[in-house]
């Protein structure tokens, strides 16, 4: 009954406020939040690093999507972006002996947001490239302040020691694909890598939706 009420309420809302694409504002049919065209037209990022890959160019479209994913209770966007990343990377990532590791949130931030956006990206990604998700590899023991307003040096200081290895049962040769929504200076990723190194893990690679320049 509750479910029926909820679904009929949702269809009334859909009728009054038909869903539109977050990026271009076109009316949507079955798509969730983003129309097919906008998804297809996300620009690919040219990568220069050998230890990380950002799949899409950082532009207004990606900016909107990541903002909605993180601050507007839209976990589905992470899932959709993860699937798109997977489609671009299919065949490039080996699936044997690899795990997807979403950058963890501190439990307080997780409680506030209700989900970890990087984990949602991993869920979409995993479905396409068939690599399992290992989410408890590290925990975030310190709830550091947001990096948004900090410069590169302050960012490095701000993330020092924030991670702690939680699960060590994984083979040390496993390729750990560290997944984050956005990489700016890479301070958080680097901190995660040094914690993994300290615990004897040998192979890692960072994956993100986009790289924003600060
Ligand atoms: Zn659109």
Image: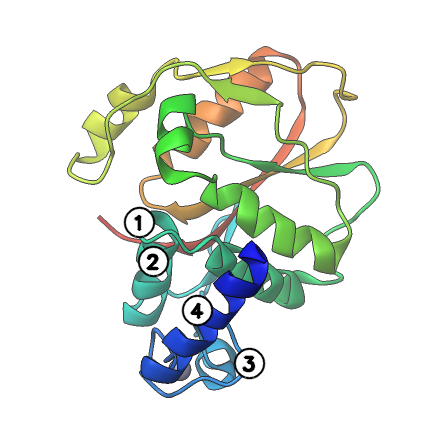
Viewer-proximal residue among 72 and 212: 72
Q: Which residue is drawn at 47% across and 52% down?
A: 75
Report whether the residue tagged 1 is closer than 8 Å to ligand 1. no
User: Is residue 58 shown to the viewer in this render?
Assistant: no
Residue under numbered circle 2: 68
Which residue is pictured at 75% across the width and 38% down the height? 98
Q: Where is residue 21 in the image (x, y as percent from the top left)?
A: 38, 78
Q: Where is residue 83 drawn, in percent x and y?
A: 61, 62
Residue identifier under label 4: 9
Q: Which residue occupies 26% across, 52% down?
A: 213
Q: Which residue is drawn at 55% across and 48% down?
A: 120
The residue labelled by disc 1 is 71
Sequence-wise first label, 2 or 3: 3
Residue 113 in the image: state x and y as whole percent.
Answer: 38, 39
**In the rendered view, would you say 179 is above or below 155?**
below
Dot 2, how many residues are within 10 Å of its Cα: few (below 14), some (14-19), or many (20+)? some
Circle nearer the N terminus (4, 2): 4
| SS type, badge 1 | helix
- Residue 90: image location, x then y, percent: 71, 63
Q: How far apart are marks 2 and 1 (CA)?
A: 5 Å
Choose the circle earlier in sequence order: 3 or 4.
4
Q: Crowding at label 3, few (<14), some or many (≥20) Cα neighbours within 10 Å?
A: few
Q: Nearer the viewer, residue 176 or 72?
A: 72
Q: Which of marks 4 and 1 is in front?
A: 4
Number of numbered discs visible in the structure rendering? 4
SS label for mark 4: helix
Q: In this view, does 125 lie above or below 7?
A: above
Residue named by callout 3? 30
Callout 2–callout 1 Cβ contact below 8 Å: yes
């Amino acid at each position: 009954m509750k479910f029926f009420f909820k679904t009929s309420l949702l269809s009334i809302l859909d009728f009054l406020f038909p869903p539109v694409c977050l990026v271009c504002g076109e009316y949507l049919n079955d798509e969730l939040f983003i129309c097919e065209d906008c998804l297809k037209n996300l620009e690919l990022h040219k990568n220069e690093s050998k230890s990380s890959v950002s799949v899409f160019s950082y532009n207004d479209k990606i900016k909107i999507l990541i903002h909605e994913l993180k601050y507007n209770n839209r976990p589905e966007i992470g899932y959709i972006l993860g699937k798109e990343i997977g489609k671009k990377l299919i065949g490039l990532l080996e699936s044997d002996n690899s795990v997807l590791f979403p950058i963890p949130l501190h439990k307080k931030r997780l409680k506030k947001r209700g989900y970890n956006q990087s984990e949602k990206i991993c869920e979409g990604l995993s479905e396409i490239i068939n690599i399992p998700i290992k989410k408890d590899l590290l925990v975030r023991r310190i709830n550091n302040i947001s990096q948004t307003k900090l410069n590169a040096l302050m960012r490095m200081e701000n993330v020092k020691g924030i991670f702690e290895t939680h699960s060590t049962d994984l083979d040390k040769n496993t390729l750990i694909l560290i997944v984050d929504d956005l990489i700016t200076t890479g301070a958080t990723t680097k901190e995660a890598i040094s914690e993994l190194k300290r615990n004897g893990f040998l192979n890692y690679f960072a994956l993100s939706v986009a790289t924003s320049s600060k």
